[in-house]
Amino acid sequence: MPEKPVPENDPLVQKSMATWFVVAMVVLMASLFWALWDEGFGQRPWKTYQGEWKQRYGAFLKTARSASAQSEKDVEGNPDYQKLKQDYEQANQQAAPRMKEINDELRVLSAKILAVQNVFTDRRAYVNALTYDIETTTGASSKQSKLKDLEKYKAQTAVVEYPDGSKVPYTYPQLEETYNDLKAQRTSLSSRLGDVIKPVSDLKAALDAYVSEHMVDLKPAQIRGLVDKTEALDPKILQINVADANIVDRCESCHMGIREPLKLTAAAMSLKGKAPDNYARAFTSHPEPDLLKVHDPEKFGCSPCHQGNGRATTSVEKAHGNYEHWLWPLFPKPNVEAGCQTCHAADMVLVSGDVGWTLTQGKDLFRQRGCTGCHRFEGYDRESEDLNSIAQQIKQMEQEKKDNLKQASYLMKQADSAQTNQEANRLNDRAVALRVGNSKLDLRIVQLDRTTKSLLQDVKKVGPNLKDVRLKLNRNWIPVWLKKPTDFRPMTRMPNFRLNDEQVQAIAAYLWQSALPDPPVTHKPGNAGRGKELFETRGCLGCHSIGEGDQMEGGTFAANLTRVGEKANYDYLVRWVHNARQRTRPYCIYEKKDIGPEDYAKKGLPFVFDLQHSKCPNDGHELQVQNMTVMPSLRLTEQDAADVASYLVTLKKKEPGSYPDAAFMDDPKLKDEGKKWIRHFGCAGCHEISGLEDEGRIGTELTFEGSKPIERLDFALLTEMAQRGDGEPITDPDDRWRLPEGPAKGPWYSHLGFFEHKLAEPNVWDQGKIKSETEKLRMPNLHLAPEQIRALTTFLMGSQESGLPPSYQYLPLDYRRDIQEGWWVVKKYNCMGCHQFIPSQPTALMGMKHYQDMQEQLPPKLLTEGARVNPQWLLRFLSNPALNDTDTDRNGVRSYLQVRMPTFSFSENELGKLVRFFAALSRQPFPYIPEPGTTLTAKETDMARGLFSSTAAPCLKCHQTGDAEHDRHATAPNFLLARDRLKPDWVERWIIDPQAISPGTAMPSGLFKRENNRWVFSGPTPPAFQGYDKDHTRLLVDYIFQLTPEEQHRVAGAMGRTQSSSNRNFPPARSARGIAREHASVSGGGAQ
Amino acid sequence: MDWKQLWEIASAPDNVPIVALIPLLAFYIYLAWKQAHDNDLLIAQLEGDAALAKTHHRKTWPFQPGWQKEVHVWPFLLRIEFLAAIIVTIILMIWSITLNAPLEEPANPNLTMNPAKAPWYFLGLQEMLVYFDPWIAGVVMPTLIIIGLMVIPYVDTNPLGSGYYTWKQRKFAIGTFLFGFIVLWVAMIIIGTFIRGPGWQWFWPGQTWDHNRLIYEVNRDLPDLFGITSNWVKTIFGAAVVGGFYAVGGMGLHAYFRRSNPKDYKRMSFLQYSLMQFFVLTMLALPIKMLLRLLFHIKYVWITPWFNV
């Protein structure tokens, strides 16, 4: 028997489980409610957002409405508005009795129609049913009898009881007629009513239009509409669904304000007296509404630009794609422009308002810093790739030609032994066809050679040609420079390669020993003082800078020349300043060698090579006859060049001779070692180096770097650190400050983190690794500033293989393509260092002290260049800005400018691109066909001359005339250039309002005023104008376009007589403001 | 000790069932063992007393005088089952609210995830791939598992222990089951979840799963250790070793089984007995092969032109 005490009851049967059940059921119900809440709100956080939106936006609209009502009242107080309103009320009153009359008639008629309609529709339904029955009856006799029934029914009368109580019986046909009659009456009445109302409603529309034209903000009525819309809002998912592109974006379920017509800021959407919270930030309107106009959200959605998970609605993190498994997380705010790059990879300039500057900077940096030297990127540095492919094509065609000849002679032989005449003819024809084919190929090769010539002119290297180091450089300076370029020149584009001393010596030795041995052409020393002046005024500082730190002045596009005297040889500098493109020896890309005088001598040719003599003496192919630099020729005389060079050699901090002697550079044993390292570090990507002309790129392709799987980005031993956010691996303060977001505070295992760290310290992934010299990461330190890293990172993040259909990519084929291509050229030669292309864009020269008081000495703005100039002329000007073959030491158009428009030696290809670019930028039709000018009558010429020489607007006071004495003070181009150069339509717009075309120009506005639908001169008009009813502007333009030198001389002479006294009082360089004031007083007088 | 790594593995929604499996398995084994232990005591008591043995057929706990020998399914069983159903519903609901399905990014055919792991219930099979040819680990072994499970009722000749927990009456059956389930199945799932990291390398719990980790490990075949070079000799040698394992193991198992389960042995036909022998020895072979590999870096024992074991 069991030893335990006997329990009274069997617990299995007796124990109550009620408590267990109660607890379980309570928990079950609780989790059920939890599930319901989760379903309703937990998984739908946007509902809370929409609730908040309704409240906050409603409150915001209330204040906006009162402000709007106030400004509406202001507008309504305007006398113009009052007059319109009076007109409207008057018209309304006049029309009112007639309207009332018609409306009364209509009311009576409608009641009548209703009465007839009730009876008629009932009977018509019966008739229709019966007709259908007859139509589908098969038996002839029953059909007959049913027809009879129908006739009988139609003949029956039905009584219509009219609203006035009268009762009229109608048969069916009568009823139908009455009904149609009544309706016709109503139609004619309605149209009469419309006629009466029309003048009234027109006036009303004018009234409304006046208000909306004069109110900057929305009208109260519009705001009322928004209030109603907001109040009627029910919580629901708001989505944009574009089936074509597989876009489903529900972003607006929370970002309710993004497309509202009012400007919503986070501050405005905050609760009263509170700092902006997440709701307030979510409710702001899109900061660049203009972008949304171009990229209609109904077509583009949000995620193609911003990325993130457009479908997700369960949490902010999910929707923004900020979680591990979403491959396209929202671009962070500082890098938001990466989105533009996903479709606009082919655009060099992408600017809309405040958006696009970062990305554009990134693109510029990628190009200017020579990233393309190592990394391929689709579209960048195309020329070298095109050159290769053309060389390939030419080789192929030459082979094809040989094959064709062989085939042709084979066919001829066959034809000789053919059985029939016909067969022989056929074979013969085929042989002939092959020979013709060959001549076609020949022509094609000629064409390709031409393209090669263009490409050879277009292909540029980021760094200087190192074949010239013996001519150019202080030998002992080279190893010092290689060790750490930034120590010598902090702003240099040359990156730091972290070379050890052996590498520095070997590389320097190879460069020195492989350089061309040609002796320099010696020059006499120039005048350094004059050189300084030339350097500062000719425009060198549009690209180059001088001075370090705060003292720096000039552009950042090219080298800082503060210490150039320590490194460069005087004689080479003279050559370089005179024409940087001048090569020591031409290079043959087919033979792969520098062609010297001996090669020319062999063929009995003089050693002359330039763009006109660019054929290889050995094989007849195109030679590289220029230095591959973008530095243009400023068309300085030899003497000027010597002066500038003399000035440049004075720029130094220590004596060139004080560099330690680097005798090892002549050690032939180091040469091979040096070549190995040069190849290893990819130096030939940016520099022309003897023996390494055909080196490929050593880096990875970056075209789609932004969409590379994160696993393929090698964080090496820092992977865990990056994933967990355990601190910042970059400890060197020299590099740490470069991080745009500062040292990492959280996890940075992302494309953004990778790019930023890589750019801040390119060898960061070598940390902790044991590697030999050849295994170490090769990417040099580009010593970038944080905002530059941000720009490049933005560029790289956006460089993605887009999942959007091709129609979404920006690959235009019309004028926009010309714009795209033009920007590549404009950016390549840094045109924007001197010229303004976009209204708010700063140029390098603009910021300089030198120009602060001499705005009129700045190069012209090119905001409307395409509309301004004749493209034929532009082509001529760009290829030779002196517009003169012999006297080139001058500016062709604005000889009054000290700054020089350089000769860039553009290739045919780039000239075409630039001319088309300007035309496209101003939406000008291309090609341009000038209108035939109107010939002025003698009377008109007199009148125009009167205007032209009017004392109120003496054109020739500022414009050049060709008279040297006068031109010293002139600040505008000679009129004689106008005919070839300008487009008359543009000139007309220009003389009406030059400030609107080129803000800040010295040319005064307000010379003409609008009167009776034409432009008339604001100043006192000569009496001859009595009765002249055409545009004065047009007259003046026609006159200018017909101006002859003699005429100009005459007018100038006449003016000179009358104004000689006042002319002398002008200071040599008058300020633009002064002239504008003068003109203003003139036009003011004219207006009275 | 890298706690974060451990937490990352344990907290992954994928691994929740496995983390739950460990305590649950321990608890239920403990519960079953406790009941079996009590029953075994009771059985000993009943069998020791001839009178009780005749009158008391109910052999499960609780047994007290005065209690009903049998109770009705309704309500006594069903109310417990209903309670259990409610609790499971609660667990499932809370689970589904708090943890979302562990969906990942769209598959990228150009990029294999590392480590690439099977669903948790197949991790045991995946782990076997380390030790055997894919064909053996992926096809032969799973087939044997299924057939072996199907064979159990036909080779089990022990009439005792049906309908109640007991250990003493079914030592061999329960022992074999625990070996097969815990060692061969659950343990391998746990290895696959917690131990196998990037590159399917062996990481002890708490070791960081470093994607850059490199280890030096050379695996050899058993015949190589004996300096055998000829392929045919290798085949014959391997066959001899495997055959030897079955022969020696078979004799050992025979000696053990005949001594510990003499009644069952007598009741078994030759076919039943040899099937049992084959499956038990094959089960034993798996951990032996694993240990050979993990401790002695032996890759294959039996190498033939057609398959390797």
Image (spheres, rainbow, N blue to C red):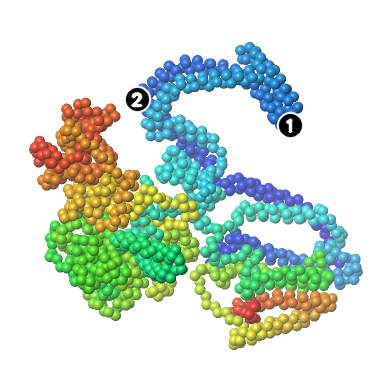
* Residues at circles 1 and 2 in contact by the CB criterion of under 8 Å: no
In front: label 1 or label 2: 1
The image quadrant of residue A496 is: bottom left
**Which badge, 1 or 2, comes first in the chain's sequence?**
2
Residue type indicated by callout 1 = Thr
Rendered-image quadrant of the C terminus of chain A: top left
Q: Position of residue B179 (x, y in %)?
A: 71, 72
**Circle 1 crowding by C-alpha within 10 Å: few under 14, some 14–19, many from 20:** few
Q: Position of residue A367 (x, y in %)?
A: 34, 59
Give the labeled residue for mark 2.
Answer: A80
The image quadrant of residue A451 is: bottom left
Query: Cα distance, mark 1 to mark 2?
Result: 77 Å
Q: Which chain letter goes with mark 2?
A: A
Give the labeled residue for mark 1.
Answer: A138
Query: What residue is rendered at 17% in x and 62% in y?
Result: A645
Q: What element does badge 2 sit on?
A: helix
Q: Position of residue A679 (x, y in %)?
A: 35, 72
In the image shown, does B251 or B42 lie closer to the viewer? B251
Q: Which chain letter goes with mark 1?
A: A
In the image shown, does B303 or A387 lie closer to the viewer? A387
Rendered-image quadrant of the N terminus of chain A: bottom right
Q: Is residue A327 visible?
A: yes
Q: What element does badge 1 sit on?
A: loop
In the displayed structure, would residue A188 be above or below residue A558?
A: above
User: Can you name the residue that lies furthest to the bottom here?
Assistant: B227
Residue type indicated by callout 2 = Asp
The image quadrant of residue B107 is: bottom right
